[in-house]
Amino acid sequence: MKGIVFKSKVDRGYKLFLCVVTLILFIVCLIPVIIFPFNWLILIILVGVFVLSTLFILLPCFNLCYIFFYDYLLVKSGFFRFHIKYSQMTKIEATSNFLIGTRAMMATNGIVIYYSSGITGELKLSPDDQDAFLKILQERAPQANINVR
């Protein structure tokens, strides 16, 4: 079954944020190599920590998408998958808070979907074509209070 796919919007601020986080991680992994005498085991462990941490941070960014299926919205972000049934959506609002909360976005602003299931009950998204995304969402979840503008 094929759904309607939306990619995530990527903005300059988020790219800068990811670069800074990756640079800090690199520096933290490099410091022990500089301070302590050279040791192959330490070098291999630190390179492994850096590579795995960087993959965990960056992988969700490369395959982040939102897919509308018949009765639910599927959000794919790296290792994570979120299934939100349209019937459980309660409210959709604009957001500019990309640092806190459950998010599947690569922009500093987007929308937040509140729903009645899940641990947090909210998910932040940043679809590339937000107007078309909201139009489909309004059709499939008419009970949700949409307050975006």
Image (cartoon, rainbow, N blue to C red):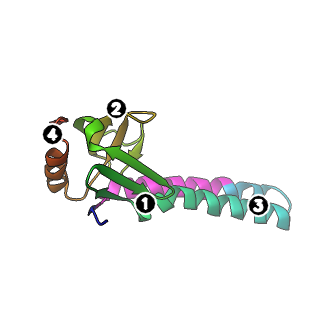
**Reading the chain from its start, which is encountered first: label 2 or label 1?**
1
Determine the CA span between mark 3 and mark 2: 43 Å
**Reading the chain from its start, which is encountered first: label 4 or label 2?**
2
**Label 4's element?**
loop
**Reading the chain from its start, which is encountered first: label 3 or label 2?**
3
Determine the CA span between mark 2 and mark 1: 26 Å
Residue 143 seen in render: yes
Q: Is residue 104 above or below residue 115?
A: below
Q: Identify the disc placed on residue 116.
A: 2
Mark 1 residue crowding within 10 angstroms, few (<14) / some (14–19) / many (20+): many
The type of residue carrying mark 4 is: Pro
Q: Is residue 66 above or below residue 122?
A: below
Mark 4 residue crowding within 10 angstroms, few (<14) / some (14–19) / many (20+): some
Query: Which corner quadrant holds the N terminus?
Result: bottom left
The residue segment tinted magenta is 6-28
Q: Is residue 121 above or below residue 132?
A: above
- How far across and down, in percent of the image, does residue 71 sit? 27, 49
Dot in front, 3 or 1: 1
In the image: residue 36, left or right of residue 83: right
Q: What's the residue at 30%, 58% (across, down)? A: 67
Q: Identify the disc placed on residue 45.
A: 3
**Label 3's element?**
helix
Residue 95 seen in render: no
